[in-house]
Amino acid sequence: MKKYYVGIDSGSTMCKTILFDGKDITDCHRIKTGWNPLLSAEKSLKLLLERNKIGYEDVIVSTTGYGREAIEFAGFTYTEITCHALGALFLSSTVGALPAVGGVIDIGGQDSKIILIHDGKVVNFLMNDKCAAGTGRFLSIACDTLGIDLADIDQFADPNEGISINSMCAVFAESEIIGLLAAGTDRSQILTGVLQSIGNKIWQMTGKLMIDESKPFLMTGGLSCSRLLMDIIAQITGLHIITHEYAAWAGAVGACICAANTVGRTTSPPNKAIEPDTYE
Amino acid sequence: MNKETLPSQFESFAEARKQGFLAVKKLKEEGKKVAGLFCTYTPHEIFLAAKAVPVGICAFSDETIAAAEKVLPRNLCPLIKSSYGFAVTEKCPYMYFADLIVGETTCDGKKKMYELLGEIKNVHVMQLPQNQHDETAAELWYQEVLRLKAKVEAEFGITIKDEDIKNAIKIKNEERKLLQEFYELSKKCPPPMSGTEQLKVLYGSQFKFDPMAKNQELREAIDRVKHEAESGNLIPDTARRILITGCPLAGVTEKLVTAIEQSGGVVVAYENCIGIKPAERLVNELEEPYRAIADRYLQIGCSVMSPDKNRFDLLTQLVQEFKIDGVVEMTLQACHTYAVETTQIRTLMQKEKVPFISVETDYSTADTAQLKTRMAAFIEML
């Protein structure tokens, strides 16, 4: 009987890994996905196993995210929609004070999405179309142009005043920001405007879903570490938004939960037979 | 879904499209006239009555889009760009051999493109009303059908006799009944064929040029699908039953069907221009033929109509009849009419309690992974 689950969320930007013992999250790791999703997944898995002195034969590996199909050693793969939803339910339940979440707002590197949950199941979801507006990539392009480190946005942005960014397209928004900088506009206010434009994008998506506003939404994805962005989204959408220390790992947590649920129903042996030694 | 052994009845139709080039060349050499048609609103009966060959020329490949963008704006529907591109590059055999091309004032992009196409091809544009439920619209469309008849007679140097048009109506109605019988096979749970297979016949049937032989082949295809279904289910009964609606779907956009059917779904119905819409209504054989033709064609549901009640009604009916688990709408990039109408379709499906997802795509394969994720997640949700 395997004792542990490893969930790997191989996103377009970051590869997030969770070690789960069937009850609790026991470790986590996060590295850049890089050009090869298989390689970053292997590295993360190896690190988690070594750090926790666990053998490959003791874990069930499941994957999600854009790179999921490339991670050929995984026993199970699930879409990030299902994983984020189940991950969010688990995370919100570990912080007992919260009511069950009504859904997830995930701002990933390549996608932003809203997932609605009812009775523990995904009932609807919406992802942005082929456009980087309102995604992590959009913010990262803007930060590059503004010369600000992505990790410092909460300290840098002006919490009171934002300059409206009108361009729908990330590339055009970059030109717009360059224009604003040339006109001598305050960088901290431009940054706030960028965060507000992400909030507006999310607000527009909520209009296409039947949202139960009485329930909190868990914000996931790498940008869930920004308290300011969370507040801006809450203010613009009118939703009660919460986060969690593992919110960036929600997809990986969900992959573990999905695998645990699947294993509970089937007896088929999961992981493909590879030895940890052959990882690199 | 494993598609290693495709039954030949599907392949015959898929092949028809590929072999169409030689077939149409042969027909031209035999002195037949070829008419290239865009939308489902063009009355095929007029061409059949004129002993001409009507063939669909809406294009479904990104091969010629770059050439089209030398003239057309980039932010335009890929179907329009691709079709125009095939005309300027002379890469489409049907467009190349067509003696006459017929379009209608459907969407803004198409009707403006027809003006440009008219500079290099022999184009006739029918004035399509944008309302289906008032007398002036019906009268305008009737006059347009008569004007098309006169145009065809003048271009091809023939006279369409009353018996010719009546006979054409009969043959075309027969084809519609056969197509209906064919796609309605998928009402069965599980369906006797995949959506990929169904589409092969629906799309390929446009490229079978002998109407009598086509009807005969459709009959055989139906009988063989039925026969094979008796010897066991080819589609697992766990497969989620999907209806596709929205913009015309064929060629490269079949990526959507693949994404659905690789994720545990099966497409059982196509509420599209290639699918149920061109087959679902018959021309009344008892009325004055041109009036009956006009009345039948004007009732086709499409987002160019305002309001588009017939599409909503048809969708409501199909989700029940085909026991649909989920509706997937495909809109093409920059197709404003379908994209705006999505809001109404979403509300309608919420009312019908049928899960709904709308995806926007184009003729590239760049979004294959994104489509796969969306479809897999949608089917996991059902």
Image: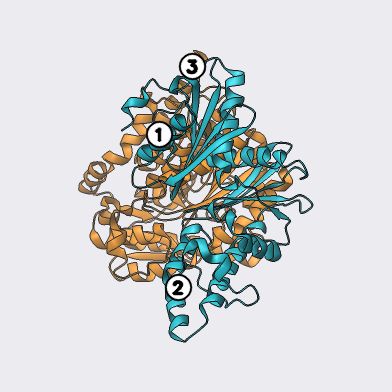
Chain colours: A cyan, B orange
Question: Is residue A47 or residue B184 the one in the foreground?
Answer: A47
Q: Are marks 2 and 1 on the same chain?
A: yes
Q: Residues within 10 Å of mark 2 (few under 14, many from 20)?
A: some
Q: Chain of mark 1?
A: A
Residue labelled with disc 2 = A146
* Amino acid type of the residue tagged 1 in the rendering: Ile
Label 3 and label 1: CA atoms lie apart by: 17 Å
Question: Is residue B309 or residue A272 the one in the foreground?
Answer: A272
Give the mark nearer the N terminus: 2 vs 1: 1
- Circle 3 sits in a helix, a strand or a loop, which is it? loop
Q: Are marks 3 and 2 on the same chain?
A: yes
Q: Residues within 10 Å of mark 3 (few under 14, many from 20)?
A: few
Q: Chain of mark 2?
A: A
Residue labelled with disc 3 = A269
Name of the residue lying farthest toward the left: B29
Q: Are marks 2 and 1 in contact (CB under 8 Å)?
A: no
Q: Position of residue B313 (x, y in %)?
A: 67, 48
Give the mark nearer the N terminus: 3 vs 1: 1
Give the mark nearer the N terminus: 3 vs 2: 2
- Going 67% across and 37% down the picture, which residue do you hit? A90
A113 left or right, relative to B116: right
Q: Position of residue B77 (x, y in %)?
A: 43, 61
Image position of B18 with respect to A54: above or below: below
Question: Is residue B157 or residue B358 the one in the foreground?
Answer: B358
* Amino acid type of the residue tagged 2 in the rendering: Leu
Q: Are marks 3 and 2 in contact (CB under 8 Å)?
A: no
Which numbered disc covers residue B275? none
Q: Residues within 10 Å of mark 1 (few under 14, many from 20)?
A: many
Image position of A131 with respect to A182: above or below: above
Residue labelled with disc 1 = A71
